[in-house]
Image (cartoon, coloured by chain):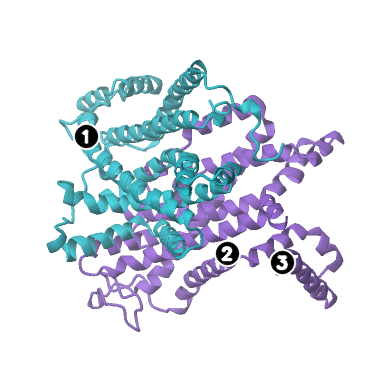
Amino acid sequence: MPDGIPSPIFCPPLHPAYMAAFVVRRVFWTIPVILLVILLTFGMMRAIKGNPFRNTERNIPASIQKNLERKFHLDKPWYVQYALYVKGVFTYDLGPSMLQRNQTVNDIINEHFPVSVQLGVFAMIFAVVIGVPLGILAALRQNSLFDYLAMAFSNIGFAIPSFLTSTLFLYFFALKLGKYTGFPTFGWSGWRSWILPSIALGLGPMTYFARLVRGTMLETLQQDYIRTAKAKGLRWRRVVGVHVLRNSLIPAVTAAGPLLGYIITGSFIIETIFAIPGIGKYYVTSVSSRDYSVTMGITVLLSILIIIANLVVDILYGVLDPRTRDQRA
Amino acid sequence: MSTTDRQARFNAALVQAAEAGQLHDAGAALTRSSLWRDALHRFSSNRAAVIASAAFLVMLAFVVIVPLVKSEDPYAVDFSQAYQPPSAAHPFGTDQFGRDLLIRTALGGRLSIEIGFAATIAIMVIGILYGSISGFIGGWVDNALMRFLDALYGLPYLPFAIITLAIFGTVNFWTMVVALTIASWFTTARVMRGQIISLKENDYVRAARAIGARWYRILFRHLLPNTLGIVIVFVFLELPGVILGEAFLSFIGLGINPPKASWGSLAQDGYTAYQTHPYIIVVPSIAIAWLILSAFFVADGLRDALDPRTRVTREA
């Protein structure tokens, strides 16, 4: 069968029971996936030589050493530790921090994670609000000057590492023009401090959205049903609004999964540069200070976040595009 | 000029070259490697791809030649020369220890590109092995391997790279390569599996099986050579990501350590001094962007040149 003609087998009826079965199957599948990812993280963390309590760097009496190991379950076999950890993850009790005496991993995540979520959401809003219209306009004016400029901009924005844009933003808008803009050079308090990091982090996803939307728009514009709609004499605005946009924005929804990974990676850099007390900056700190329970807790948290995002994207895609439902899950 | 026209001229030129004795085994080569010749021809008529490959080679030449030509010691500390602005003697200026940034950028580029290529090769090897085992064996093995891959898919590579470096306890060339490989091979494995599965359905594979070819002959003779095109494309797609990954790790201080330089560690030096000397971070960052963009367009051109589907639509 030639490409482009969907086989009728892959177009099941939009029956609620069918949809429910798809969703349930997909949701249940994430449980073993989460268990596996925790196991891998757990295994990697155990492979790190030494823990903060090993007697290499400081002198601790044997009895205290024993107590410490018992407190962190380090005296039990690995599968018990793993089971305890899984239980901790599902009850959201990630244990005490190994370094900061009065803090649990939960405290640290509760304190730093909301900041990162804010930063990520702002960056994503910037990316969608600028990137999607940019892609749409570029596709509607294909090969125009605007199209070339938009694509040149998005190619360069894609290639420039985020630490350069962030640092230049800091230098020009916070350091040199700080008197006029009022942008601080560090921290996360008040809307003035949100703007530069959010744009710096959202620039990459923005260019990604622009190119993706442009590509799918151009593809959709060549479809037969668009020609039909035009031939029927529909106004161009309606053709674009109803037929083109609806069909070409579906891939942008599925891009949200991979982009979350991109945002997480980017936030490590952006939070370091702008000295934002978020989870990415804390992660780097926890690794260099060997606070392994925090490192592990954050890794597992970020992984679960990605897994859930993939789940949501898959279900959304199934709802938006019935053709994919049969092949997945 | 139409495609067939161009093709005809190209063939004529080839025949001429063959007659002039410039091609070694003339008659045979024309038919034997026609796919690759075809691809080369299509690639070289793609202006963006040609410019990008030139830019890529210029960067490689820069990192190889500059350290050979410049005789200065890239590690010698001379505080009287600290933070010199760009000049004739130091085109990119000097850093906080008075070291010339031109030679350090070239040396750092060498390290970054070497790490990038090594990690890309590792990614390709793991991806090809995993993908072809999964696609070739099929059945429950394929199912299990793919479910495992599904679980890992989309995980951010940076935390896992950081943990890997913590496991090794030291940062050097090889630990960086492992760290950058460990969570980056999933896409390649998936694509390779898809390639093997679709190639398996070809008639020549069935024919080979029908005349009793062993599995290793089918895999190594019929399937893997046909994935070479996509493998080459993927080398150029993976390379930018890996080089950026190295830069990120070194930038947050968990990668290449001073006095050694990589583009990431140079950028970190630049960031520390950004308030007074903002140009220092620009040079290594532009170098990274240069490499990413050129590799990206080379990959794009290669895909157009090697993908048989685009060939059909272009010649039709």
Q: Which residue is mark 1?
A: A108
The answer to which of A303 and A6 lies nearer the viewer is A6
Hey, which quadrant is residue A255 in on the image? top left
Residue type beneath disc 3: Ser
Q: Which residue is mark 3?
A: B2
Coordinates of residue B72 in the picture (x, y in percent): 38, 78
Coordinates of residue A167 in the picture (x, y in percent): 27, 60
- Callout 1 crowding tier (Cα within 10 Å): few <14, some 14–19, many ≥20: some
Chain bearing tag 2 is: B
Task: From this view, report whether residue A6 is shown above or below residue B220.
Answer: above
Cα gap from disc 2 to disc 1, whole angstroms: 48 Å
User: Closer to the camera: disc 1 or disc 3?
Assistant: 3
Residue B199, label in figure: none
- Callout 3 crowding tier (Cα within 10 Å): few <14, some 14–19, many ≥20: few
Q: Which residue is mark 2?
A: B49
Kindly indicate which chain is depicted in cyan in the rendered structure.
A
Kindly indicate which chain is depicted in purple in the rendered structure.
B
The answer to which of B154 and A3 lies nearer the viewer is A3
Coordinates of residue A146 in the picture (x, y in percent): 43, 62
